[in-house]
Image (cartoon, grey):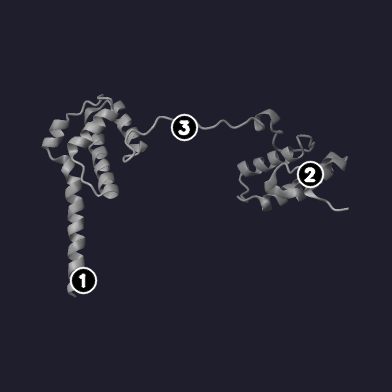
Amino acid sequence: MYDYNATRKPLILKEYGRNIQKLVEAMDAIEDKAERTLHAQSILKLMAILDANNKNSAENIQKRWDDLFIISDYTLDVDSPYPMPEKAILNKKMQRPSYTKEPIKFKNYGRNIERLIQKAVLTEEQEEQERMVIGIVKLMKNFSNEWNNDNVDCDTLLTNIKYLAGNKLTVDFEKLKAQNIFSTVHREKNRGTKTNRSAETRQKAS
């Protein structure tokens, strides 16, 4: 008679395969606890070979013992260095991670820019908040230059930042604009473009 999967017991832990499960099930027929423990240790060695990590750290060894108890449906009676795991805890459904459902206000900048701005809002030290805003503006200019090939003016960027921050930033934007801090990214990008063009011209001339 053929042994089809449809007639077999379902695999409890697929990563170890059906043969390991059969070996665990066969231990029920062993009456002597010491002998069962020896068989359990032999099965654990096979499980270590099948384990993708294949590391004998204390954490992995305990995990394999836990898996052995799980495969036996928590009925295994052996001398284990670790207590049998609680069935209720292991069978507890994992909770879905909470993802924010709030839409991104400016998709061209992404959600990380919004998070950086909110972090800047929570920064109480004035100089640190100023440094964060300067870095955010440079990032936004880079994103605009790389993805849209468009040099967005600083007034637009600062207006967007104020909006995303809910006008809660205490930075003096006019002072930063007067210092021409926000124009450095554009100059650096143009400098790199000119250097590349010069290299291409020299290569063609040679």
Q: Quadrant of residue 37?
A: top right
Indicate the secondary structure of the residue bearing disc 1: helix
Residue 150 is labelled as none
Q: CA distance from mark 3 to mark 2?
A: 41 Å
Q: Which of the two discs, 3 and 1, labels the residue nearer the N terminus? A: 3
Indicate the secondary structure of the residue bearing disc 3: loop
Q: Which of the two discs, 3 and 2, labels the residue nearer the N terminus? A: 2
Q: Is residue 187 left or right of residue 163?
A: left
Q: Quadrant of residue 196?
A: bottom left
Task: Name the residue carrying label 3.
Answer: 99
Q: Are marks 3 and 1 in contact (CB under 8 Å)?
A: no
Amino acid type shown at disc 2:
Val
As drawn, 190 above or below 93: below
Residue 203 is labelled as 1
Task: Name the residue carrying label 2.
Answer: 24
- Residue at figure coordinates x 65%, y 44% from the top left: 61
Q: Between residues 206 and 132, which one lies in front from this camera angle? A: 206
User: Residue 68: where, in percent of width, then height?
Assistant: 73, 41
- Residue at figure coordinates x 70%, y 43% from the top left: 13
